[in-house]
Amino acid sequence: MITVGVLTPHATAGPESEFTVLAPEHVRVDVARIQKPVASSGGEPPATAPDLRALATPQALDAAASALPEGSFDVLAWASTSSAYAIGYDAESALVNGVCARWAVPACSSSASAVSALRLHRIQRISLVHPPWFGAEQNQLGATYFHSQGFQVLDARLAELPNDPDQIEPAMVVEWVSQHVSDRAEAVILGGNGFRAAGAVQELEDRLGRLVLASNQVLLWSVLHSLHVAVDIGGFGMLFEHAPHRRRSARQATPGIP
């Protein structure tokens, strides 16, 4: 059983609910909420790029990690897709590497994990789909993030779905996405840790015939790789066909994808 310490600014359940659906017999989750700075403009989720950047600092992540029981986690997972969009890939990687060094466990993040998965599958052209609560600014930040890493973003859309995460069902995601993504895309990314879309991945891949990544799904994939843990996960997309072959101690594992 792996214990994942999830660091997230979002009050709504995201990875803590999807991780246990994806791998119920192998993963348990402890969640620590990243607190908003006093000077932030408020709102849930954070609505502006400055607010998102204020949540993506070593101090903010360390404060959240400190709230977890000491020695209780094997790996730390930073679950804030939009915050990573706001600071960019290089700053995200530096932030995660710092967390790994300070807490002496592997550390992963959602957006960088998606980049690793796309590169593993040699993907160049992508369609990007975000939940409606992202808004136009965060949607554009996502497109810029992936473009900066050399991907051709054919389209970036806000899905016309309920604005409440609890009202979104996998079937809704399948129907909307299958009708709106570019035919030229080699992969589809469903971005947002509060966008609980992992249950839509398999059917979307079956319909579209291409790789589909959802933020919590790809974050768990990265967590398992960082620990070199072999876990058989079926029904959540071709991503999990690339499983590690051995396990090392969490204290010996290194961050990122091997």
Image: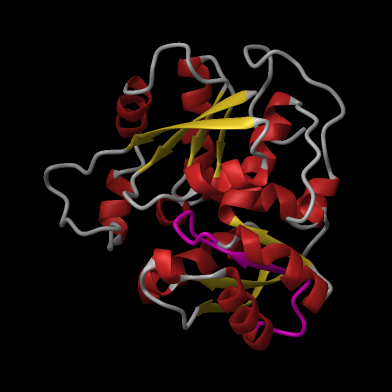
User: Residue at position x 46%, y 17% from top?
Assistant: 102
Q: Is residue 103 visible?
A: yes
User: Residue at position x 30%, y 33% from top?
Assistant: 60
Q: Tell whether 22 sits left or right of 110.
A: right
Q: Tell whether 187 sits left or right of 92.
A: right
The quadrant of the picture occupied by the C terminus is top right
Residue 165 appears in which quarter of the rendering?
Answer: bottom left
Against 70, is 123 above or below?
A: below
Q: Main secondary structure of the magenta part?
A: loop
Residue 188, horizontal then vertical, whole percent? 68, 69
The quadrant of the picture occupied by the N terminus is top right
Residue 152, horizontal then vertical, whole percent? 68, 71
Q: Which residues are magenta?
A: 181-196
Q: What colour scheme does the image use?
A: secondary structure
Residue 8, horizontal then vertical, whole percent? 39, 42
Q: Tell whether 205 sits left or right of 170.
A: right
Residue 122 appears in which quarter of the rendering?
Answer: bottom right
User: Residue at position x 32%, y 38% from top?
Assistant: 33
Magenta span includes 165: no
Magenta span includes 186: yes
Q: Tell whether 80 sits left or right of 49.
A: right
Against 96, is 106 above or below?
A: above
- Toward the viewer: 193 or 91? 193
- Toward the viewer: 234 or 61? 234
Q: Is residue 150 visible?
A: no
User: Residue at position x 30%, y 26% from top?
Assistant: 63
- Toward the viewer: 213 or 118? 213
Residue 21, horizontal then vertical, whole percent? 61, 47
Residue at the bottom extreme, as displayed:
179
Residue at the front extreme, as displayed:
25
Q: How many marks?
A: 0
Against 169, is 223 above or below?
A: above
